[in-house]
Amino acid sequence: MHQPNCAACADRALADGGTTPDVADLLDGLPDNWGRWGDDDERGTLNLLGSREAAAGMNAALKNGEDAVERFTLGLPLTGEAISEDGGTGDPGFPGREVARRTNVSDERAYREGDQQASAGMKFSDDRFETPFYLQGTTHMDALGHAWYGDELYNGVDAAETAVEKRFETPVEGIGGEVTETRGHGRLSVAPLAGSGVAGRGVLLDVGRYTGGSEGDRLPMGTEISLDDLQVTAEAQGIEIRERDILLVRTGAMARTRDPDADWHPTDEPGLVFSEELVEWVHDHDIAAVGADNVAIERVTQRIDGETYVLPLHGAFLRNLGLPLVEMLWLDDLARACADDEVYDFLFTAAPLHVQRATGGPLNPLVLKATEE
Ligand code: UVW
C-alpha cells in the first residue's frame, strides 16, 4: 500500500542509492521564529499580515484605479479523474494521495416520481465524495504541524501532538468500515490558519517564463530553482520583493497535468531547492507565505553535498520559520495577465477549509490585480 506521505520518497531515495543523512544537521544554525509571537503561537508568519499588509495588497490592486481591477482564482479544478500513466487531464496526485471522486445525490428520482410534497416544489442537488478525499490532494495549504524533524514541531510543540486520538460515542459508517476513533492534531493543525486567513501583497515570480524554459513557458521536469533564479526573475519582471509579501512561484508544472502530451510526475517536478541563502533571504524579508504551482513547492528529493534529502525546505519553512506553504496552485491565467500588462503584484487572499485537527486544507485563493486602465 502507498504511504500517503513523503516517507515513500525516502524509500525511493534509498532505492536510488542515496543515503539518509539527518536534516537536523543540514538546518542547524539557520533562522527560526520560535517564540517570536509567544510560546502558544500556532499561526507563524501569518502573524505578519495585519491591517497594513492587507492595505498594501489593496493598494496594489487599485493602482490603476477602481475601474481596472481583475480577479483570478488559483484553485485547481477537481475532475475526479486520476492522471493516467501516459499523461492526461485528470487530477495531479502525490503517491498515496488518492483522487477524490464525487457523486451527485440529488433527489432527482424522488422528483421524477412526483414526491415533491416536502419541499413544496423546490428542488435541490447535493454531492458527496465516494472515495477518500485527501485534504492535500488538490490545491491546499499545509498546516504548520504537517512536517517536522526530531521530536518537535514549529515553536517547540511536542511531535506527539500530531496524532491525538479522539473517540466517538456513536460509531459511523466510514470508507474503510466502522469509525469509532480518529487521530488528529492537538496543536498546529490547519484550523488556526483557517481562522486567520491570508490577505496581503502577493507577488508572482514567473520563473517558468523568465528563466527560459525549453518548453515555452514551462520549466523542464527536474529543474532546480535557486534563490538566484528567483532574483533574476524578479529583476526581469521589474518587481521589488518587499517585507511581509506573499510569494507565488510559477514553474509551469500544473499546466503539464492538464496537457496529455506533456511529461509529468509528482516526484520529478521543477521546484525550489534548499540553500542556506534561500532560507536566510526568506527570513530576512519576513515572507509571510510561499505558494507554487507544483505539489510540494520544492523538489521532492534533493542532492545536497552528495547526500539525498527529502523535502528539506518543509523543515526550514514550516517547522522552523512557521511559514505556511500553499501547493498545487493554478497560476497560468494570472501569469498570462501579469506578462501582458507587466503588473506582478496584487491583493492575495485565501483561507483553507476550517477542518479541525487537520494537517492541511484545500483552498481556492482569490487574487485581485490591477489591470490596464
Ligand atoms: C508533499 O509533501 C509532497 O506535499 P505536502 O507538503 O502537501 O505534503
Image: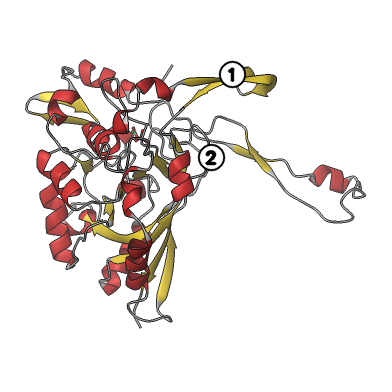
- N-terminal of the pair, mark 1 or mark 2, is 2
Q: Is residue 334 above or below residue 300?
A: below
Query: Which image quadrant: the C terminus?
Result: bottom left
Q: Given the image, on which type of amino acid does mark 1 rest?
A: Glu
Q: Nearer the viewer, residue 209 or 329?
A: 329
- How many C-alpha atoms fall within 10 Å of the one at disc 2: few (<14), some, or many (≥20)? some
- How many C-alpha atoms fall within 10 Å of the one at disc 1: few (<14), some, or many (≥20)? few
Q: Which residue is mark 2?
A: 80
Residue 50 location, x and y as percent? 36, 58
Instruction: Write the residue at 18% across / 66% down.
Output: 237
Q: Is residue 130 above or below residue 249?
A: above
Q: Is residue 222 above or below residue 330?
A: above
**Going by the image, does 6 lie left or right of 114?**
left
**Going by the image, does 1 lie left or right of 306?**
right
Q: Nearer the viewer, residue 69 or 16?
A: 69
Element class at badge 2: loop
Instruction: Write the residue at 32% across / 67% down.
Output: 56
Q: Which residue is mark 1?
A: 181
Q: Would you say the residues marked 1 and 2 are in contact, meaning their CB atoms lie under 8 Å apart?
A: no
